[in-house]
Every structure is written in C-alpha cells, then in structure tokens.
C-alpha cells in the first residue's frame, strides 16, 4: 500500500510539475543576443579612369588578344556577371584598356577597398596613384595591380 501512495504522489507531482517547469523555462528563455553589425557593404566607385599602364607583352582580355603597349585603364559601371563566389557583386566590375581613344580590350577587375587591403596583400603594393605589372607563378598570367587612393584594382590577364 505504501508503494501505491508513493507512486501516486510521484505521478501527481510529475503531472503538475512538468507544465509549471516548462512554463518557467519558456518564460525565462530569450533569444540569443546578436552583435549589431556595423560593417557596411563595401561599395565601388562609379566609372572613372584608373591610370595608365604599360603592358610588356601581348595578352588576352576577355578572350581577345591585345598587343603590348601603353593603355589607359578605365573602370566601367558594368558589374561582372556571373558573380564570383564569396565576393560582393559591386566589387567585381569591368575595366577597359583604351589606346588611341579606342577600346582595345576589356576584362573583369577585382576591387579591394582600402579597409580590406591588409587582408589580401602579400607583396609590396604599388604607390598610391601608381601601378604594378607582375608575371604570376607559372608564367601563364599577368596581374595588373593599380592603387588609387589606397583602393586596389586587380586585373588578371592570360598571355596571348
């Protein structure tokens, strides 16, 4: 008989106690706190001239051959599609290589804002307002690296 009394008491306590405990847990539960995001989506400037570069050899821009020589590099407002994984679509744009007032070729440029430059920079960058032409490891590609007010513009061109 004692067993039935203990079992009944335990069953009553559990029957009445579980909803109360569940209500306390629900009432005391709050959503996890999230840190406010202060970082804004990086933005790219509008169309503008990035400067002049001298290409030492014939290269390909957007699959078309362009000859060695001096070109004005002009940033367009056209966003590159399809989007590159992990990048902001606004930071993948097209640049034009202009010679004698004519567009000789165009290629996708990756724009690295000044705030993110230290995250991707390994080599010494060109001086502000300058450019640097580098043959990449393996010799199949050339990187055109332009520094405009601390923002880097990187164009990768295959050799022709």
Image (spheres, grey):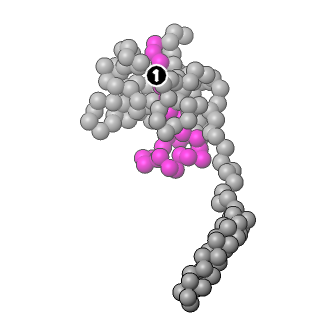
Q: Is residue 76 left or right of residue 109?
A: right
Is residue 146 at all visible to an observer of this figure?
A: no
- In the shown orientation, is residue 12 left or right of residue 144? right
Closer to us: 81 or 35: 35
Residue 37, position as x, y percentages in the image: 67, 51
69 or 105: nearer the eye?
A: 105
Relative vertical location of residue 54 with respect to residue 113 in this rendering, above or below: above
Residue 47: image x %, image y %? 63, 23
Q: Secondary structure at mark 1?
A: strand
Q: Quadrant of residue 35?
A: bottom right
Q: Quadrant of residue 60?
A: top left
Residue 134, position as x, y percentages in the image: 38, 35
> Where does the image place residue 115, in percent across and percent down from the top left?
60, 47
Give the labeled residue for mark 1. Answer: 107
Whether residue 89 is visible to the viewer of this picture, yes or no, is yes
| Residue 39 appears left or right of 75 | right
Residue drawn at x 41%, y 18% is 62
Nearest to the observer: residue 71 or residue 32:
32
Instruction: State the quadrant of the C terminus.
Output: top left
Residue drawn at the location 63% of the way across and 82% of the way down: 9
* Residue 82 in magenta stretch: no
Q: Bounds of the magenta span?
A: 104-131
Can you name the residue that lies furthest to the right here? 27
Compared with residue 150, is residue 80 higher up or lower down, i.e. above or below? above
Q: Is residue 107 magenta?
A: yes
């Amino acid at each position: 008989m004692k067993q039935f009394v203990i079992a009944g008491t335990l069953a009553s306590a559990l029957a009445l106690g579980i909803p109360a405990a569940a209500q306390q847990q629900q009432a005391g539960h709050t959503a996890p706190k999230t840190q406010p995001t202060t970082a804004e989506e990086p933005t790219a400037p509008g169309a503008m001239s990035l400067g002049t570069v001298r290409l030492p050899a014939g290269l390909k821009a957007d699959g078309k051959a362009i000859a060695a020589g001096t070109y004005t590099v002009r940033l367009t407002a056209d966003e590159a599609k399809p989007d590159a994984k992990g990048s902001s679509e606004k930071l993948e744009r097209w640049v034009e290589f202009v010679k004698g007032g004519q567009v000789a070729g165009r290629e996708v440029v990756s724009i690295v804002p000044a705030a993110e430059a230290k995250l991707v920079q390994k080599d010494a960058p060109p001086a502000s307002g300058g450019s640097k032409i580098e043959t990449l490891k393996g010799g199949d590609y050339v990187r055109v690296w332009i520094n405009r007010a601390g923002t880097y513009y990187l164009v990768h061109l295959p050799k022709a």
